[in-house]
């Protein structure tokens, strides 16, 4: 039996949970490896907590389209010291990984949540681990690894297809022993999806919520946001210039009643969610 003590899934009052991103990678699409070294990643994690993040998502594998996977040893080297330091501060930490061995060691180092973009499909040992430990688990809609995922962005009806595939995966996860109250679903914007697919899913988040579990939205700084207001054929705006658009998606997520939003720039989303909460309080 595991000695890891699970925590309940955290919630915020009157708004979505803000999950701040710490990428401990040299090739992240969003920040170009600014937090690759442990000291920089720890400092960044502390900064976004001070800015209002409810929890910090630490990942050591880039999932941008075309990215190659690091070795298990390299992924562990990247994330464990960061997780241990932030957890020692009392921060709620999620580990962004598709590997059960990384998830287990991250939980032992102080992480509380497993955020698996593959929903347990990439590693057959992941579901038994999460079921054993009883920790909260984020399962994303996934059709394959980053090296070729965009070739699989083919749907008859993206909302219906994603919801059906998420429901099928949910049933497998619950049958595998994951607790219903610990499971979060993520529609997987940008993963085997084009811009129109992403917009359709944002417009119909209520369909994802209808699956009966908390929902995490991860739109932050993705390329489809960088194409807003850009002429056809022109390059998208750089990731750091997509934070206002990201905050707008956080507002849409809040209005749709999602559990959480995963963002790179915490202050803009915290402010945007405060506007939504203040407006709701005066209705």
Image: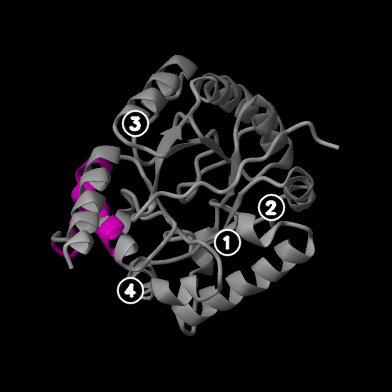
Q: Secondary structure at mark 4?
A: helix
Question: Residue 71, relative to residue 259: is it above or below?
Answer: above
* Nearest to viewer (mark 3 / mark 2): 3
Residue 6: x %, y % from top left:
67, 40
Mark found first going from the N terminus, 1 or 3 = 3
User: Most extreme residue toward the bottom, as rendered?
Assistant: 156
| Residue 227 in view of the camera | no
Q: Residues within 10 Å of mark 2 (few under 14, many from 20)?
A: some
133 or 60, nearer to the observer: 133
Tag 1 residue: 142
Tag 4 residue: 203
Residue 279: x %, y % from top left:
17, 60
Tag 3 residue: 48
* Nearest to viewer (mark 4 / mark 1): 4
Magenta region: 231-252
Report, in whole angstroms, how far the alpha carbon at label 4 lies from the one at label 3.
28 Å
Tag 2 residue: 122
Residue 88: x %, y % from top left:
54, 20
Q: Residues within 10 Å of mark 3 (few under 14, many from 20)?
A: many
Chief secondary structure of the magenta portion: helix
Q: Secondary structure at mark 3?
A: helix
Side of 3 where 111 appears, left or right: left
Circles 3, 2 touching at the beta carbon (< 8 Å) = no
Residue 243: x %, y % from top left:
23, 46
Q: Secondary structure at mark 1?
A: loop
Side of 174 where 92 appears, left or right: left
Q: Secondary structure at mark 2?
A: loop
């Amino acid at each position: 039996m595991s000695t890891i003590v699970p925590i309940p899934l955290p919630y915020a009052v009157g708004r979505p949970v803000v999950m701040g991103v710490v990428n401990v990678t040299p090739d992240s699409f969003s920040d170009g490896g600014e937090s690759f070294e442990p000291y920089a990643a720890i400092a960044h994690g502390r900064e976004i907590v001070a800015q209002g993040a409810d929890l910090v998502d630490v990942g050591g594998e880039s999932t941008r389209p075309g990215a190659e996977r690091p070795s298990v040893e390299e992924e562990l080297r990247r994330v464990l010291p960061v997780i241990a330091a932030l957890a020692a501060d009392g921060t709620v930490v999620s580990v962004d990984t598709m590997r059960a061995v990384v998830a287990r060691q991250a939980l032992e180092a102080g992480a509380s949540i497993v955020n698996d973009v593959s929903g347990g499909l990439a590693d057959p040992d992941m579901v038994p681990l999460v079921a054993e430990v009883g920790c909260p688990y984020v399962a994303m809609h996934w059709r394959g690894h980053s090296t070729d995922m965009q070739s699989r962005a083919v749907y008859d009806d993206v909302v219906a297809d994603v919801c059906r595939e998420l429901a099928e995966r949910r049933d497998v996860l619950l049958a595998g022993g994951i607790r219903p109250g610990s499971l979060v679903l993520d529609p997987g914007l940008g993963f085997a999806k084009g811009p129109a697919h992403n917009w359709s899913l944002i417009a119909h988040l209520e369909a994802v919520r209808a699956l009966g579990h908390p929902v995490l939205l991860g739109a932050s700084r993705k390329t489809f946001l960088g194409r807003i207001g850009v002429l056809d054929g022109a390059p998208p705006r750089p990731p750091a210039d997509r934070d206002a658009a990201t905050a707008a998606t956080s507002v849409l997520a809040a209005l749709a009643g999602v559990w959480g939003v995963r963002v790179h720039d915490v202050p803009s989303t915290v402010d945007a969610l405060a506007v939504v909460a203040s407006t709701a309080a005066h209705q």
